[in-house]
Amino acid sequence: MHRTNRYFSGLLLACGLLFNAGAWAVEFIIDKGVENPIPIAIVPFSWSQATGMPPVDVATVISDDLTRSARFASMEEKNMPQQPHDFNEIQFKDWQRLGMENLVVGQLKQTDQGDYLVDFRLVDVYKGKQIAGFSIPSTQLQLRRTAHEISDIIYEKLIGVRGAFATRIVYITVIKTREGAKKYTLQVSDADGYNPQVLLDSKEPLLSPSWSPDGKKLAYVSFETKNSAVYIQDLLTGAREKVASNPGINSAPAWSPDGTRLALTLSMEGNPEIYVMHVASKQLRRMTNNAAIDTEPTWSPDGKLLAFTSDRGGGPQIYEIPADGGEPKRLTFDGNYNTRPVYSPDNKHMAVVHGDGNTYRIGLYDRASKQISILTDSHNDESPSFAPNGHMIIYTTTGARGTALAAISVDGSVHQRLALQDGEVREPAWGPFTNR
Amino acid sequence: MRPGWFVTTQSVIFALILHAVVLLLLLISFSFTPELRTAKPVSIVNAVTVDKAKVDAELKRLQQEEEKKRSAEKQRIEELEKKLQAEQKKAEEIKNQRLEEEKQLLATRQKKEEEQKKREEEQKKVAELEQQRKLEEEKKATAESEKKKKEADLKKKEEEKKRQEAQKALQEQVEEEELKAQESEDRKLVSELGNEIHDKIAKYFNLAGLPENLSCKLRVNMLPSGEVVGVTILESSGNEIFDRRALTAVQKASPLPVPPDAETFERLNLRDSTFIFKP
């Protein structure tokens, strides 16, 4: 992909000449560039066992990760001039001829104990030098995650920002049973949609899952008691705690960045308002007081601000208040419909659902310019959630085949549906980085 | 010829003639004497009547007269002898004189000869000197000519040198002008080349995901073919990825646009140039 960009507005000055002691000293100035996906070739890893297939095609997992990020252009296996597995086997000229800049070679080994070892090297083809190389112990269950971790390392080494491939997402699925009833499940999967795990299923609606900042707990809304209630569930133990089951609406929990509080929408006082609950003490503090609906609270990355959706101005728009209380301030003025705000990790943008009366699309609100740019081009896109590195957004998109998870890079260049099972997928939330 | 012999012969003849004359004179005087004797008897006859005393006296007087005559004759002979002697002496003197003269003449001749000899010697000497002089002159002339030649050569050389210098100066001026023209042309060339290089590298300079306001300086070694044979970082941007992308861009853009001929390539010092990346 070749896009013009801000760099093409540079000076036309392309070179300078200096005369030093009668000798020419030519200086060429390159003041422009392109923003292209970075070429990379992930050579299939060697497999230590003589028979059978490796449990995971590590190279393909990495390749798909990088491609999905939109920052990389992965070379297809059939186009590779050779398939080296170690640094010494690389014929650099062959790869350079194809314009290949980066190469990943590796070996998957199974130990006598049945565990796995993944060796890989990231190589700069033009320098002929290794950029990174690791030997990562793994297990059969962890192999995909290990592959994602390798993707993260590659991403960081070549882009300069930590990759978010070895992270997880949480979402709700809705399946229609043979009896015509609906089955709701709360699921967690890898960021690429693989390895889904059902945390909870219910005949009643499940809504609004939210990650604790340490990635160990989830808060969500369940109607299992016929009325909405907010629960916190420990991912590892499965233990759950009902933290809000007030009369009326109990919805849209959002964990504060420090993990001590939850922002919620409660209508226990008659009108849906934004509250902040201290998780340990369950103490509530009401943040809004307005006859209109105030909902979908979300925390700024520094925890100092809360954004939410309110129709106090007529149509639904995004407002912001200080997390310790204050006057709400309207942020969005583009169009008649802007909802579901979520701050980008760098606090420079917000992803929103932007509606124009016919379509609902994912928009990117620029906090500095106060403008919204539209990232997606479907008719019904909802529930944006930023990857922890801020480079991607997952969201749901509803089409003829139902509602599915999709991912888009923040610069809007790649859309990709995530591989998931049948059924409707709702309200994805991208989990935080977890310790390596 | 020997003039001395002639002189001697002449002198001998002269002496003989002189002796003959003297002898003749003596004979003449003898002949006169008898005539005188004849006259005397005449006188005696007349004196016959004279006394003996008178005759003695007369005889004595005659004796005396005789004596006187003899004495006179003797005196005359003596005188003649004297005269002869004187003449002999004179002749002797003349002879001596002549001898002297001859001697002198001889001396003169000798002198002359010596002088001649001397002169000849001198002439010889002069000739020798002359020859020597000539030789020297020749030598000198040769030296002179050589010197002149040398000088001429030197002058010629100097002139040649001057000419060459002038030529050189002119050439330098021309070259300088050419250089200036070249320089201006080169600037244009480098500017055009810079644009081509910029455009080619910019196509490969991937800024995706990089922060703004970074810059780095690379040293690029290339061959006249434009092939990049070495890239090193002179000044890092501080961002490892930015630096690497710049390095990759240069290498991917290889071969870089270069002047059509190697000469221009070398003149522009393109073998070793600096690339500044500051998007």
Image (spheres, rainbow, N blue to C red):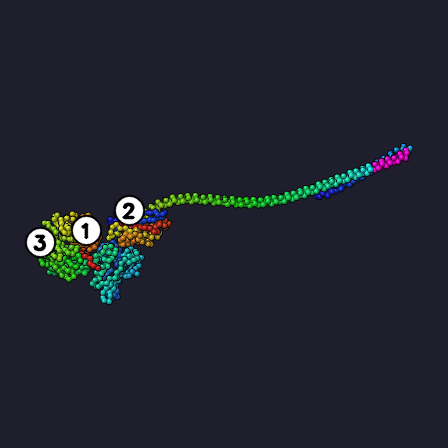
Residue B82 vertical position relative to residue A349 in the rendered view, above or below: above
Circle 2 — which element? Answer: loop
Q: Is residue A46 visible?
A: yes
Please give the chain letter of the residue carrying mark 1: A
Numbered badge on residue A337? none
Residue interval drawn in magenta:
B50-70
**Contact between labelled residues 1 and 3, with CB atoms less than 8 Å apart:** no
Percent across and percent down for residue A318 are 15, 50
Circle 3 — which element? Answer: loop
The foreground one among A287 and A47 is A287
In magenta stretch: residue B54 = yes
The foreground one among A279 and B196 is A279
Please give the chain letter of the residue carrying mark 3: A
**Dominant secondary-structure state across the stretch colored magenta:** helix
Circle 1 — which element? Answer: strand
Number of the front mark, 3 or 2: 3
Q: Is the residue at mark 1 from the same chain as the one at mark 2?
A: yes
**What residue is shown with label 3?**
A268
What's the CA distance linking mark 1 and mark 2? 32 Å
- Within 10 Å of the Cα at label 1, are there few (<14), some (14-19), or many (20+) other Cα atoms? many
- Give the side of residue A352 with respect to residue B203, left or right: left
Percent across and percent down for residue A253 are 13, 55
| Quarter placement of the N terminus of chain B | top right
Residue B75 vertical position relative to residue A156 in the rendered view, above or below: above
**Contact between labelled residues 2 and 1, with CB atoms less than 8 Å apart:** no
Number of the front mark, 3 or 1: 3
User: Which amino acid type is shown beneath numbered disc 3?
Assistant: Met
Percent across and percent down for residue A356 are 15, 49
- Within 10 Å of the Cα at label 2, are there few (<14), some (14-19), or many (20+) other Cα atoms? few
Q: Is residue A408 visible?
A: no
Numbered badge on residue A12? 2
What's the CA distance linking mark 3 and mark 2? 64 Å
